[in-house]
Image: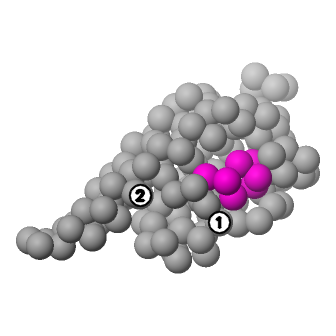
């Protein structure tokens, strides 16, 4: 959990210095033009969150969608994805994996809340959204 959190903080900070996107694209989990944490998520069994990251990227690029809407949808998506990790009877380790996935989802969401305004604004502007016209 800590490794994903630290890596994501680094990626978001580095992502603030990268260029703007000019076309709709999703790059998985990580800031545009920076290191991607998809491999790390797969390694710790949390690959179920990657589609949520892609949806979040597209949401930031969608004119008329607020940052709060995108970030809330992102959190809901990650929680739902983590809850797909099911434990059978006697499989306590799967319940622990689900718990850790939910904890990482919360950490990732908090990072996005803390550092997402600049990328959101830049992406909205680069896509010619009205409130930046």
Please tell me which residue is depicted at 27% across the width and 69% down the height of the picture: 94
Considering the whole magenta stretch, tell me its main secondary structure: helix
Q: Position of residue 66 (x, y in %)?
A: 60, 28
Please tell me which residue is depicted at 44% across the width and 72% down the height of the picture: 45
- Judging depth in this view, the residue of 123 and 40 nearest the camera is 40
Q: Position of residue 63 (x, y in %)?
A: 66, 35
Query: Which secondary structure, mark 2?
Result: helix
* 88 falls in the magenta region: no
Query: What label does residue 37 carry, if any?
Result: 1
Q: Position of residue 26 (x, y in %)?
A: 65, 60
Which region shows up in magenta? Answer: 5-12
**Would you say 91 lies left or right of 43 here?**
left
* 8 falls in the magenta region: yes
Query: Is residue 22 in view?
Result: yes
Mark 1 vs 2, N-terminal side: 1
Q: Quadrant of residue 91?
A: bottom left
Q: Residue furthest left?
A: 89
Q: Residue furthest top?
A: 131
Circle 1 crowding by C-alpha within 10 Å: few under 14, some 14–19, many from 20: some
Query: What label does residue 101 carry, if any?
Result: 2
Please tell me which residue is depicted at 91% across the width and 47% down the height of the picture: 17
- Judging depth in this view, the residue of 126 and 92 nearest the camera is 92
Circle 2 crowding by C-alpha within 10 Å: few under 14, some 14–19, many from 20: many
Q: Position of residue 126 (x, y in %)?
A: 83, 42
Please tell me which residue is depicted at 57% across the width and 37% down the height of the picture: 110
Image height of 8 relative to 127, above or below: below
Q: CA distance from mark 1 to mark 2?
A: 14 Å
């Amino acid at each position: 959990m800590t490794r994903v959190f630290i890596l994501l903080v680094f990626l978001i900070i580095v992502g603030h210095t990268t260029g703007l996107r000019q076309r709709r694209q999703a790059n998985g989990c990580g800031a545009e033009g920076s290191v991607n944490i998809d491999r790390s998520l797969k390694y710790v069994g949390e690959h179920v969150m990657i589609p949520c990251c892609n949806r979040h990227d597209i949401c930031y690029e969608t004119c008329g969608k607020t940052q709060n809407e995108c970030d809330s949808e992102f959190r809901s998506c990650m929680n739902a994805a983590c809850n797909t990790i099911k434990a059978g009877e006697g499989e306590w380790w799967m319940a622990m994996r689900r718990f850790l996935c939910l904890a990482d989802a919360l950490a990732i969401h908090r990072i996005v809340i803390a550092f997402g305004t600049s990328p959101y604004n830049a992406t909205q502007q680069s896509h010619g959204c009205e409130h930046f016209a």
